[in-house]
Image (cartoon, coloured by chain):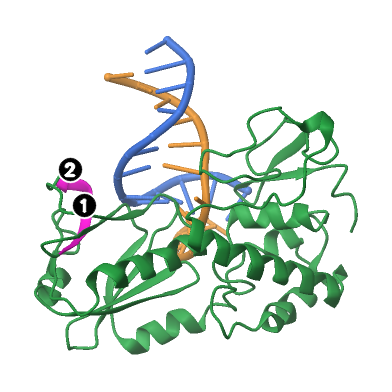
Chain colours: A green, B orange, C blue
Amino acid sequence: MPEGHVTHRLARELEAVFAGRSVRVTSPQGRFAASAGLLDGGRFAGADAYGKNLFLAIGESGALIHIHLGLIGKLRVDGPRPLLNPETLRLRIETADHVAELRGPQTCALITPAEQDAVVGALGPDPLRPAADGERGWARVSRSERPVASLLMDQRVAAGVGNIYRCEVLFRQRLNPMTPGSQLSHRRWGRIWSDFVELMPQAVLDGRIDTVLEPHTPEAMGRPPRVDRHGGEVYVYRRPGMPCLVCGQRVRAREFEGRNLYWCGRCQRSR
DNA sequence: TGTCCATGATCAA
DNA sequence: TGATCCTGGACAT
């Protein structure tokens, strides 16, 4: 479920419904039960996101819930609802009016502020944070021989970026995914970073990733589907074999470092 | 009912 | 590089 826009959207959602209220905190599944018990009945003090990490402050102790959704985790915020499938429900936060349910996270742990600092300190700049400094990402990119497709998945380069943004921004910049970081110009990195800064906040608002801003070519028009199952409109992500929306050539796909990479061999020839 | 797959990351070898 | 963890939706049988 998650690239950074999801985490940031969740932080806002959780604050909107829980901030300042006393909340019931449980772990029906049991795996977070001991920690949940410590927080249960506490006041929800705030939620914050950094990259794909979500931090929830509950109670007066200063302790935080650190959540990372991983590949398959889901956190949904709803109105009151019955407790279903408790065997997979890691964390449930509720008031009389709202329920938040966490299933399948990679991480759900009670941590100290110092531990939060360590998590955040290991991350690169997050395009969704106001003070983010893209130059920190450039410092790492510019001295790396790794392909840019690899670098953009590195949370030390740009925190919150995932496979969709990786593929889509490389397409938007017409950049060959295998270009070594050291071969990128500073200006080129600046355009990549600007794309993140432009696209990601919009996705927080919309709850979906849209990257297609230009009109499609006539020959690509009407050849579905352009909208990925995740709900957004994209150029190449998960469109293998379908015509490129710009040039019409079949979108390519390959496995790269354990993840699927999609690109247009014609549009993204340049290095 | 079963199999595959996913917007992720870590760990061992 | 491969195995592993976590869950559920889509699709095939």
The image position of residue A4, as x and y in percent, is: 51, 64
Label at residue A85: 2
The image position of residue A229, as x and y in percent, is: 52, 38
Residue A217 or A168: which is nearer the viewer? A217
Which residue is located at x 80 percent, y 55 percent?
A178
Quadrant assignment for the C terminus of chain A: bottom right
Which is the main secondary structure of the residues drawn in magenta?
A: strand
- The picture quadrant where one finds residue A95 is bottom left
Which residue is located at x 37 percent, y 53 percent?
A73
The image position of residue A242, as x and y in percent, is: 72, 30
- Amino acid carrying mark 1 in the image: Leu
- The magenta segment is A85-94
Q: Which chain contains the residue that carries disc 1?
A: A
When the figure is inspected, residue A218 is found, relative to residue A53, above or below; the finding is above
Residue A236 or A66: which is nearer the viewer? A236
Label at residue A89: 1
- Amino acid carrying mark 2 in the image: Asn
Residue A46 in magenta stretch: no
Same chain for mark 2 and mark 1? The answer is: yes
**Is there CB contact under 8 Å for labels 2 and 1?**
yes
